[in-house]
Amino acid sequence: MEKNKIKILFIAFFTLVIFLAVGGFLFFQDISSFVIEPFKSSAKGKVFSIKPGQSLTAIAQNLETESIISNKTYFKLFTRYKKAGKKLQAGEYILSASKSPEQILEIFLKGKVKLYRITIPEGMNIIEIATLVETLNFCSKEEFIGLCHDKAFIVSFGIPPISLEGYLFPDTYFFPQKTDCKTVITTMVAHFNTIFTKEWREQAKIMGFSIHQIVTLASIIEKETGDAKERPLISSVFHNRLKKKMRLESDPTTIYGIKNFDGNIKRKHLKMVTPYNTYQIKGLPIGPIANPGAKSLSAALNPSYSEYLFFVSKKDTTHKFSKTIQEHNKAVRKYQLRKK
């Protein structure tokens, strides 16, 4: 009788071991398939957010609720097995059930967040860029403008402590949502430094200009140019005037120095003395009046050869260039006053 009991217990124990082994094997197979196989191979991408401090349990639950994964428990177990529970980076992601949980976890760990595009057109000034940055929900306009005039921050880039006008290079950038102002500005200035090459720096030195002066001149060329092909010729006019110690007399520089400009430049504006009004000051303004692109920077360093000292808009995006004041006045009557 005692032997029968032992035999029965042995069989029961052996059966339990086999059951657990089979169960464990099946579980292992199940979770292995979960990890490497997408939930829905044809699913489209969607935005998925991880909030700062959000728990693994909440993240896994949201993944299952959004039908990105099939099993929240398996995802938690796999994440903990990888010792990654506290390494998931907050942010917005583009995820799809067409990716395996293993790939999704890798995305979280690398912080491959959704990026938002911002395009800065050539010739925008700080206020215009700050407005665009705020509109796209990166950071506040007020903070952006404040940093661009923060002397300590400006000097950290090796730039004269006037403002960062001219150094926010116009291009297309990609940032995560709500990127802080310092990151946005630092990225733009860093890009400027890659565009303004060592060769350009040497060229400026040979010409007798500082980098700041070239950027300032380029910003004026940018604002004066309607037809891109005219940049080198417009540059030649300003270079010729500087050599002859003539005032540059550029309307855009005057406008930049006017607070709350209403779009209508008047004679009284031309008489205002500001560090930017080139009708009143000699030489270049104190700093750039906009953020020039590479072509305007190149034109400032490589002006066309000409004897022109004047130009006037023909009101078709191009200009009439003149060598003498007499020729210029005649062009003004023809193209501005419409008198023959």
Image (spheres, rainbow, N blue to C red):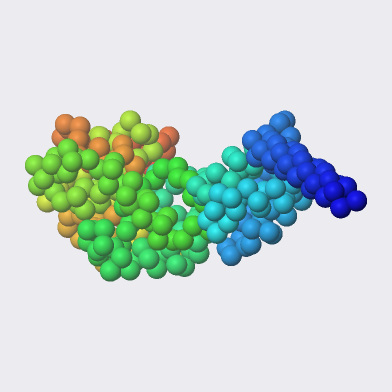
Nearest the viewer among 204 and 136 is: 136
Instruction: Say if 333 sits above or below 80 in the image.
Output: above
Q: Position of residue 104 (x, y in %)?
A: 61, 43
Left or right: 208 in relation to 118: left
Left or right: 147 in relation to 99: left
Residue visible at 34% across and 66% down in the picture: 149
Question: Quadrant of residue 28 in the image?
Answer: top right
Nearest the viewer among 143 and 50 is: 50
Residue visible at 53% across and 56% down in the picture: 87
Residue visible at 35% across and 34% down in the picture: 228
Left or right: 126 in relation to 204: right
**Residue 300 in view, yes or no:** yes
Nearest the viewer among 73 and 11 is: 11
Q: Position of residue 280 (x, y in %)?
A: 23, 61
Instruction: Say if 294 sits above or below 183 in the image.
Output: above
Q: Position of residue 173 (x, y in %)?
A: 45, 45
**Residue 207 in view, yes or no:** no
Residue at the farthest right position:
1
Residue visible at 29% across and 54% down in the picture: 288
Question: Quadrant of residue 196 in the image?
Answer: top left
Instruction: Say if 179 sits above or below 35 in the image.
Output: below
Question: Quadrant of residue 315 in the image?
Answer: top left
